[in-house]
Image (cartoon, grey):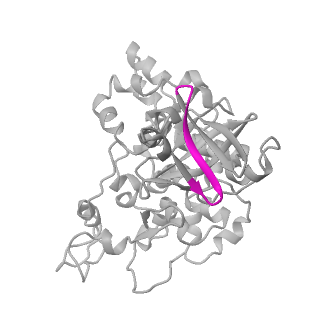
């Protein structure tokens, strides 16, 4: 939600002429919208039917160990009905006079609403009340809320931020005129109506089976990023395994078989590929959120290396490892240790400064404006003192 998924069409020739990116690398990868037009499964694919999905419980019957750890990952908590949001629940437990907060001239109060939550918005003598339907994002960083008004999905003007232990204005909120039913003094405090393409991007990246038969269907989605968000619809696979069908294991998509470039673009379906960023002409520190884009910009990426894909360092079935030293072994899959010379298998030179916690120097953290959290930059490099942010 923080980062828009709106694509601007540009000439491919202009993209290939950009500095810091060779034609060979560009031609090996494509934008996510292009991927979604190709045959076969790719995350956010909108064409399968809802009946083709079985849900994570069916997957866990055979893959219980993986399912148990994946449930504790951040991806498994990217979306929840607002009624189950722990951030909203903890706020609702406060005393009545502590459930209010102000952002600028707008005053908000959290309310109970039909087994869920709503908020009241007031400014001066005017006020309105809106129910909250969905909470997107993990409470560990931040969470934005979605509701419907007059048949249109809206993004709340306020978001929860863990570092603040409270609410602040939703980042990068592109305000559009609110419905005329909203009193004029309140319109800028309601949030924004989501355009169809933006709503599709938000729901398909934060959920599973949010788009089926080519249409957005929030009423029947599977909350959060679960098994079938990456492996594709599993009904045929489950049926084949249950009946002992030969080759049933091939009836589900396995991203492990992807080439390094495709593997990074696979994750880039939501985290944004190099082309996705280039087509929006986005620059600056906010691109740190586009991890695949930043990774591919690393000099050591070259033309793609399986030791440097997203899944080489991060197991999507497990919670994110936060200890910096835990990634040293991954760096040493390419780099030699101190006192050794590079080899064909380990072409990376030894660090002349340190021997542990490599990421703390070579992958610095950056604060993104209005998100109140420092994100790791995956453009791996030698960081120079007082350097400008490297676009």
* Figure quadrant of the C terminus: bottom right
Tell me which secondary structure the magenta stretch mostly adopts.
Answer: strand
Residue shown at 40% from the left, 57% from the top: 309
| Residue 325, placed above or below residue 240 | below
Q: Position of residue 293 (x, y in %)?
A: 52, 63
Image check: 292 left or right of 352? right
**Would you identify the image quadrant in which residue 141 lies?**
bottom left
Q: Does the magenta run of residues contain 94?
A: no
Would you say residue 43 is visible in this rendering?
Answer: no
Image check: 87 left or right of 176? left
Q: Residue furthest right?
A: 180
Residue shown at 68% from the left, 52% from the top: 189
Would you say residue 363 is visible in this rendering?
Answer: yes
| Residue 7, placed above or below residue 201 | below
Q: Position of residue 176 (x, y in %)?
A: 76, 53
From the viewer's side, name the closer residue of 72 and 120. 120
Q: Position of residue 250 (x, y in %)?
A: 44, 30
Residue shown at 46% from the left, 33% from the top: 84
**Would you identify the image quadrant in which residue 106 lies?**
bottom right
Q: Does the magenta run of residues contain 110?
A: yes
Image check: 365 left or right of 269? left
From the viewer's side, name the closer residue of 121 and 317. 121
Q: Residue furthest left?
A: 339
Q: Total number of numbered labels?
A: 0
| Residue 100, placed above or below residue 29 | above
Q: Position of residue 108 (x, y in %)?
A: 59, 48
Residue shown at 47% from the left, 33% from the top: 228
Which stretch did the figure color magenta? 102-115
| Residue 231, placed above or below residue 184 | above
From the viewer's side, name the closer residue of 277 and 339. 277
Image check: 196 left or right of 110? right
């Amino acid at each position: 939600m923080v980062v828009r998924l709106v694509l601007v069409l540009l000439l491919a020739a202009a993209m290939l002429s950009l500095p810091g990116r060779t034609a060979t690398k560009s031609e090996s990868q494509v934008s996510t919208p292009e991927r979604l037009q190709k045959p076969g499964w790719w995350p956010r694919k909108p064409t399968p039917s809802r009946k083709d999905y079985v849900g994570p419980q069916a997957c866990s019957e055979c893959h219980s160990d993986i399912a148990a750890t994946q449930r504790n990952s951040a991806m498994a908590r990217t979306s929840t009905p607002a009624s189950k949001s722990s951030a909203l629940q903890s706020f609702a437990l406060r005393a009545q006079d502590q459930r209010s907060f102000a952002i600028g001239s707008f005053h908000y109060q959290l309310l109970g609403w039909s087994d869920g939550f709503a908020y009241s918005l007031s400014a001066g003598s005017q006020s309105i009340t809106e129910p909250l339907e969905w909470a997107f994002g993990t409470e560990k960083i931040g969470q934005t809320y979605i509701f419907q008004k007059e048949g249109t999905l809206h993004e709340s003007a306020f978001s929860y931020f863990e570092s603040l232990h409270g609410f602040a204005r939703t980042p990068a909120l592109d305000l559009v005129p609110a419905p005329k039913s909203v009193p004029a003094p309140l319109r800028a405090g309601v949030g924004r109506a989501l355009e169809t393409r933006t709503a599709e991007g938000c729901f398909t990246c934060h959920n599973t089976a949010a788009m089926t038969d080519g249409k957005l269907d929030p009423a029947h989605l599977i909350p959060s990023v679960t098994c079938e968000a990456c492996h594709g619809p599993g009904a045929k696979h489950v049926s084949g395994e249950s009946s002992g069908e030969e080759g049933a294991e091939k009836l589900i998509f396995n991203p492990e078989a992807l080439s390094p470039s495709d593997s990074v673009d696979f994750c880039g379906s939501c985290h944004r590929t190099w082309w996705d960023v280039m087509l929006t002409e986005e620059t600056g520190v906010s691109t740190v959120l586009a991890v695949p884009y930043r990774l591919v910009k690393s000099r050591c990426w070259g033309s793609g290396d399986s030791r440097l894909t997203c899944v080489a360092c991060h197991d999507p079935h497990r919670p994110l490892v936060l200890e910096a030293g835990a990634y040293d072994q991954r760096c040493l899959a390419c780099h030699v240790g101190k006192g050794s010379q590079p080899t064909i298998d380990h072409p990376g030179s030894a660090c002349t400064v340190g021997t542990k916690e490599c990421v703390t120097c070579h992958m610095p953290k950056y604060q993104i404006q209005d998100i109140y959290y420092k994100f790791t930059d995956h453009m791996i490099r030698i960081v120079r003192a007082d350097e400008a942010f490297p676009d």
